[in-house]
């Protein structure tokens, strides 16, 4: 590359845009509304993704996002305390998995997007 990359952002869909926006706000992302059908959700200036008011089941059921965190135990505890599976239909939260490359847990959003939260060894 003859240039320096500054960020990378994925686009994800939402079965119910209003519900998904509320879910990501509850998770701690800051919403920046870009249009009536798309928002940018960010953790900081370089960690963000686009949420669209657009849904294709096969796409959402196969979409995955990996978020590397500095302290997985602290992250898991904070997300567990939000009680998201009892507040949002179809949301699932796993326990922490110990793997040969590191540790991770999974969170399915209301539309079926699979989030991996993890740390590398």
Image (tube, rainbow, N blue to C red):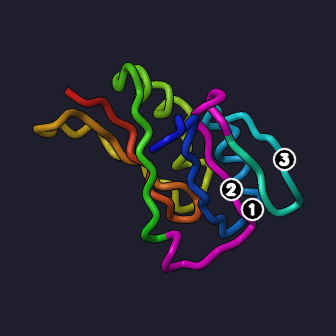
Q: Calculate the distance from the C-alpha at mark 2 to the C-alpha at mark 1.
A: 8 Å
Residue that carries the numbered disc 1 in the rendered image? 17
Where are the magenta residues, as a range?
42-60
Residue 66 x, y percent position in the rendering = 41, 45
- Give how far apart the Cα atoms at labels 3 and 2 are: 10 Å
Residue located at (37% from left, 47% from top) = 106
Q: Position of residue 7 (x, y in %)?
A: 57, 38
Q: Which residue is labeled 2 in the image?
A: 51
User: Which residue is drawn at the image coordinates 66% and 69% (left, top)?
Assistant: 15
Which mark, by number, is residue 33? 3
Task: Select label 3 or label 1 by which is in front.
Answer: 3
Magenta run includes residue 49: yes
Q: Are marks 2 and 1 in contact (CB under 8 Å)?
A: yes
Give whichever of 66, 84 is nearer the camera: 66
Q: Is residue 112 above or below residue 24?
A: below
Q: Residue 53, how many percent across, how many down?
A: 75, 66
């Amino acid at each position: 590359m003859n240039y320096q990359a500054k960020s990378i952002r994925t686009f994800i869909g939402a079965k119910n845009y209003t519900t998904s926006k509320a879910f990501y706000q509850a998770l701690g992302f800051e919403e920046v509304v870009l249009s009536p059908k798309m928002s940018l959700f960010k953790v900081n200036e370089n960690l963000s993704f686009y949420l669209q008011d657009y849904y294709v089941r096969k796409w959402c059921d196969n979409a995955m996002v990996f978020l590397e965190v500095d302290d997985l135990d602290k992250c898991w505890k904070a997300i567990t305390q939000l009680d998201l599976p009892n507040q949002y239909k179809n949301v699932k939260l796993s326990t922490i998995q110990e793997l040969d490359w590191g540790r991770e847990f999974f969170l399915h959003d209301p539309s079926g997007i699979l989030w991996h939260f993890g740390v590398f060894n």
